Amino acid sequence: MSKTKFQVVIPDYKYWRQNIKCQTGCPVNTDSRGYVRAIASGDYEKAYWIARTPNPLASICGRVCGAPCEIACRRGWIDAAVSIRALKRFVTEKYGVEAVLPPGDYAEKFRSIYKEKGDGIHGIAKNKAVISIVGSGPAGLACAHDLALMGYRPVIYEMERVAGGMCAVGIPIYRLPRELLQAEIDAIQALGAEIRLGVQVGKDVALKKLYDESAAVLLAVGARRSRILPVEGSESRGVLGGVEFLRDVSIGSYINIGPRVVVVGGGNVAYDVARTAVRQRGVDSVSLVCVEAREQMLADKVEIEEGEEEGVVRLNSFGPQRINAGAGGIVESMTFKKVISVFDSEGKFNPRYDESETMTLQTDTVIFSVGQAYDLSFLDKSGLEVERSPRGMIQAGADGISTSLAKLFVAGDLAYGPKLIIDAVASGKKAARKIHEMIASVRLKTVMAEDHLELAGNNVPQYQRYEKIPRVGVPAFDPAERIRVPVSQVEKGFDREPAEKQGGRCLNCAVNTIFNGDRCILCGGCADVCPEYCLRLVSLENIRGDSSLEKLYEMRYGTAVPRGGSAIIKDEERCIRCALCAKRCPVQAITMERFVFKEEVKCE
């Protein structure tokens, strides 16, 4: 009978770091585990600064982040992920920009915190060089924030009369209060960033002028145009783009919308559109139609559920066939065709339809939310010869920031396409460093420090019965009230007790079991006591690995292919850091140790 072979890896820095999946899953490497556990222990201010130091838009992200940290959270592999985003909101409301400190006082406090705990690049500019930034969205704001801390003079040009980019004119107010957004912006301005509103680059000021007169120019404009599917009748009166619709609602422009609304699309933005439409005066019904089946939809589960609570009717597996217009070219109905499959045999998006099975919805307004496009007309007329991609986009360099022009950089959606807010923040921060490298003629390098700290008595600080605590939803306001008052928030947020308890669900993945093979007597007690069955004693002939395993064999046995011998192998995906194995071991061959790592950026 053949024996099971186990593929193993030898732990190293990368291995220990990858164990903290919430942190490695965050584009700006926020120590989510750190602030979640600080909340669980009641140290809210510490939690806030852990969350804020790497992320200049922490308060915004506490409300609307796509939370890649939660997607990566190992607790989600066991039952459900820790409520990381909601816990961030909990501490930002106590110590963030939306709390009691004026922007100037907050900025000064942040400077001191950042200088103490930041990444080592505070105040490194040799002069107050002007950096022009086109676009005040998350990427532009994050870049301006870091450049101001470095000592530069960032000047942001925003075509709208309000700053924030898509956060201000794309994210519905029921998800992101505008006073919170403005507080975040005020704090960045207090650090030294300047924002010029109502200035359209290419019209009010020439891009070439900015390029010639600035030390560097960053293009951080978002994808602010909707894609309208070219179906029959798409030019009829009453057909709108989702991005433009959200913008008009946000800035208070007049919107000609009928009582029966159909939204085409199945992502989060489509739900933003549909739920915003529900809140408009005179709207009686909103239907959302998408080609995907329910389980294929890109929208978050909570968006779909909250949309249904508010009356959005979801119709899956139908695609647009035509828009039917009546007198004067005004929309009267829309016909859809049945979707047979969404993806082809190679997994590419390529819907197939049954043209004989159709569905017609009576409607006065059709809003498309099936993708976004860019307006680069300001660049086309600038006279700057910058390399373009085959699709007409600006060709970014290997670093994702630089362009073919020495002083011109790109960040955010323009660099890589629409992604999450936190991705834009990461891109903006990276752009700030690239700009500094160019201006100062230096190279910035990342220095990593690591250490394992043995926990006294192998006592892992855990919340009482943490492994049994279920995830609970964030308390929300009544759906009827949310619709009645369009600016009403959806989520209430956690109070103190549930916040600490939800933070206590964290498995503390920075803590690891360290095995000392010289002490082990192969009694098997650790495997026997493990409640998750994540430890196993196996013979060496049943494990496989890479060259590092062979080197380990050479060091221990003097040969790359030892005969005999045993090993303890561990399934990290199952471990809940209970420390029972370490406490059970009769010869103290197992210790529980917290892995600490920090990255600092320094000039070479």
Image (cartoon, grey):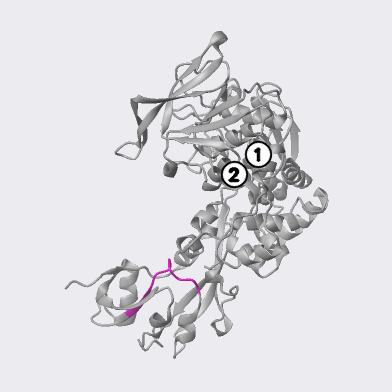
Dot 2: within a 10 Å radius of its alpha carbon, few (fewer than 14), some, or many (20 or more) residues?
many
**Local secondary structure at mark 1:** helix
Task: Please give the name of the residue rendered at 18% of the width and 71% of the height, measured from the top-left corner.
Answer: 2
Q: Quadrant of the C terminus?
A: bottom right
Q: Is residue 473 above or below residue 514?
A: above
Instruction: Please give the residue where the numbered disc 2 appears in the rendered image.
Output: 421
Relative side of 466 to 213, left or right: left
Query: In the visual, does 125 lie left or right of 221?
Result: right
What kind of element bears circle 2? helix
Q: Quadrant of the N terminus?
A: bottom left
Alpha-carbon neighbours of circle 1 within 10 Å: few (<14), some, or many (≥20)?
many
Can you tell which quarter of the image residue 3 is in? bottom left
Q: Amino acid at mark 2?
A: Ile
| Residue drawn at the location 48% of the way across and 26% of the way down | 392
Amino acid identity at mark 1: Cys
From this view, report whether residue 14 is shown above or below residue 194.
below
Residue 366 position in % (x across, y down):
54, 24
Which region shows up in magenta? Answer: 567-577
Q: Residue furthest top?
A: 328
Verify whether residue 242 appears in magenta: no
Q: Measure how far apart labels 2 and 1 are at the Cα level.
A: 9 Å
Whether residue 442 can be seen here: yes
Above or below, 516 against 331 in this view is below
- The residue under label 1 is 167
